[in-house]
Image (cartoon, rainbow, N blue to C red):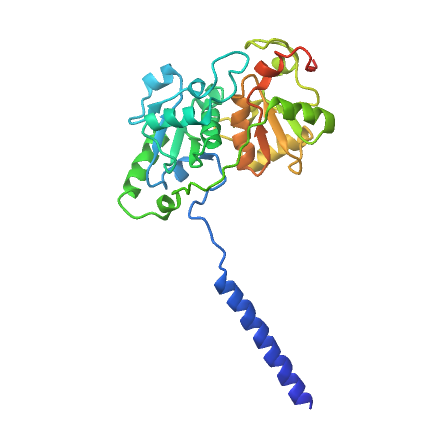
Amino acid sequence: MKIQKTYGIYLFSIALFWAFWLQITANPVKQSPIPWEGRWFLSPEETGQLPAIKLIDTRSIIARTTSQVPGAKVLGWEELSQSEAPFRGKLRPEAQIQKIISNLGISRNDFILVLGDGKNGWGEEGRIVWSLREVGYPHSYWYDGSVPSLREAIEKSKRNQKTPNPIQKSSNISNAVVFKKTDINLEEIKQQLKFGRYQILDTREPREFSGATPYGESRGGHIPSAKLFYYQTLFDEEGRIKSKEEVDKILIQIGVTPKKPIIAYCTGGVRSAFVVGILRSYGYNAYNYSGSMWEWSSYTDLPLEK
């Protein structure tokens, strides 16, 4: 009797194992062939793995003239934004932006790499990547590295085009894909002041946070409850973006937690878009208030603190 009981337990264990094995093999875990999926910026090494690249150059005219990148299309963030004050930080209608990008010879399935001035700029590369992702170009990234290293990465990428690459195949986008919107409007900020659902980051200079208006704001100060998080603190000494561990540490020091959504703003949604791209790359649920201080400060009934 004892032998029969033991044998029954053995058969039951085998059956459970077999059922579990069938479930695993029937529903295997699908891994994306794009190892950096979820990231908004790429290193030289990651760029070299791309099978094909469409380049956008948003650097200053001096940088473009002294250090040219063959094949790059020139584009400024302003071209994708509204032109009337105080809404110059807000995006143009989606169809208009898509037409501008199409005229550059770029499609939604392309891998788009944006080159900016890095530490010497205003985060324009992050703003363009944010703009493109908002209107349906999910394979948009900015380049985190020097121009010489970019040239080397481009040559490596060209060699990849000669062989089949699973990354290229995975870039095809269905028209049914729903893209994550990360733009926050003024009304949502006002609701935040009432209910405190978000953490607010002011990505401007300390002098702006304290009330200076060097870039055309109608009034000075910062949105109530905002914490100063100057975008330049995200660069290391070599001008590269700091690691997730380093960024986490900075945020902890100013009392920001990854458990609660974040809204970033600046003057016109440029520096803040750059910050949002980095935070999202590192797992934070971050949003960009594109209207930023140009819009907020234009309404005299909205509060500002100094």
Instruction: Using the image, determine if residue 95 lies above or below residue 160.
Output: above
Q: Residue at x 32, y 25 (%)?
A: 69
Q: Residue furthest bottom?
A: 1
Residue 261 in the image, given as x and y percentages of width and height: 64, 34
Q: Image check: 282 left or right of 5?
A: left
Left or right of 277 on screen, residue 253: right
Residue 210 position (above or below residue 5): above
From the viewer's perspective, tell me whether residue 290 is left or right of residue 155: right
- What x and y, as percent, mark residue 30? 47, 54
Q: Residue sitting at 66 percent across and 17 percent down?
A: 222
Viewer-proximal residue among 190 and 152? 190
For the question of whether residue 228 can be seen, the reply is no
Q: Quadrant of residue 264?
A: top right
The number of numbered badges drawn on the structure is: 0
Q: Does residue 230 appear left or right of residue 54 in this picture?
A: right
**Residue 7 in view, yes or no:** yes
Q: Position of residue 283 (x, y in %)?
A: 57, 39
**Is 290 or 55 nearer to us in this picture?**
290
Q: Quadrant of the C terminus?
A: top right
In percent of width and height, residue 259 lies at: 66, 38
